[in-house]
Amino acid sequence: MAFECINLSVDSDGVALLELNRPDRLNSFNRQMIAEWTQALNQIADDSHARVMVLTGAGRAFCAGGDAADMTVMQAADNVERKNYLWKEIQKIPLAMERLEIPVIAAINGTARGAGLDMALMCDIRLCAQSSTFAESYINMGLISGDGGSWFLPRVVGASRALEMLWTGCVVDAVEAERIGIVTRVVPDAEVRVEAMKLAHSLAAQPPQAVQMMKRAVYHGLSGGTLASHLDMISSHMAVVFDSPEFQQRLQNFLAQQKK
């Protein structure tokens, strides 16, 4: 499938690279990009070869949020149209991201503002460039976080710090972002994509069934269920992965090593 606002590729190791491709607009998204982004995520989800996904932006920004031209159009729409634009178009992305069972790594190059930060927060691991900046900038326009930021950010940095960012629209630099947990690691600007791909390839080399079950287990544990229900799920998963060829091979390798 050919895209105009998205670049998508999957290499021989199963690492999918999804690049937002409106660099002249700092990868701010419009309706076309949103539609293509959703299609690309669904395509990756259906690709049995894909083991890890890296999300990044073309040019000097990760994503500056929503395109101002689209906001102008929405200003003229009625309430039902605005609701449907969010629910039936933009908000398909966090739901599609949630359905991905493979690891998702954000390679954040430059700014991630508003919905751009929300999109980064949907990823499992976030690496950023030294020059990156972050802001939940909705309040500066008199808006509320529309793309899941009020769901994801408190889970990453805690409710108090999330509310401060949401209420003030303050800009957070890369060092502070790492300190408060928005990003996992800060790397030199020229190396952010290289480091993200290196991490992606290391994860792609791990047993895929165990990797996917581990992701499912972590998010299940954060969903508010009971410890008993979590352990019940883990015992079922563990029973299944014991039959995986990856476990059988690694067990044989371990036992052989023990005999030396």
Image (spheres, rainbow, N blue to C red):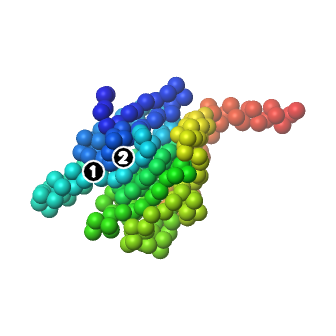
Query: Where in the figure is residue 46, as x and y percent of width and height?
Result: 39, 34
**Residues packed near mark 2 inside 10 Å, few (<14), some (14 to 19) or many (20 plus):** many
Query: Where in the figure is residue 61, as x and y percent of width and height?
Result: 42, 47
Residue 230, placed above or below residue 110: below
The three-letter amino acid code for the residue at tag 2 is Leu
Which residue does the numbered mark 2 point to in the structure image? 26
Q: Element at badge 1?
A: loop
Residue 155, placed above or below residue 204: below
Q: In which quadrant is the N terminus drawn?
A: top left
Q: Residue at x 47, y 56 (%)?
A: 133
Q: Relative to the observer, which residue lies in front, 68 or 119?
A: 68
Q: Element at badge 2?
A: loop
Q: In which quadrant is the C terminus drawn?
A: top right
- Indicate left or right for 189 with 258 as reference: left
Q: Are marks 2 and 1 in contact (CB under 8 Å)?
A: no
Which residue does the numbered mark 1 point to in the structure image? 67
Q: Residue furthest right?
A: 260
Q: Is residue 232 visible?
A: no
Q: Residue at x 58, y 52 (%)?
A: 186
Residue 62, placed above or below residue 71: above
Q: Relative to the observer, which residue lies in front, 13 or 66?
A: 66
**Residues packed near mark 1 inside 10 Å, few (<14), some (14 to 19) or many (20 plus):** some
Work out whether mark 2 precedes mark 1 in sequence or the reverse, and give the earlier one: 2
The three-letter amino acid code for the residue at tag 1 is Asp
Q: Relative to the observer, which residue lies in front, 228 or 147?
A: 147
The dot on residue 217 is none
Real-space CA distance between mark 2 and mark 1, rounded to the nearest whole angstrom? 9 Å
Q: Residue at x 62, y 40 (%)?
A: 242
Tally of numbered tags? 2
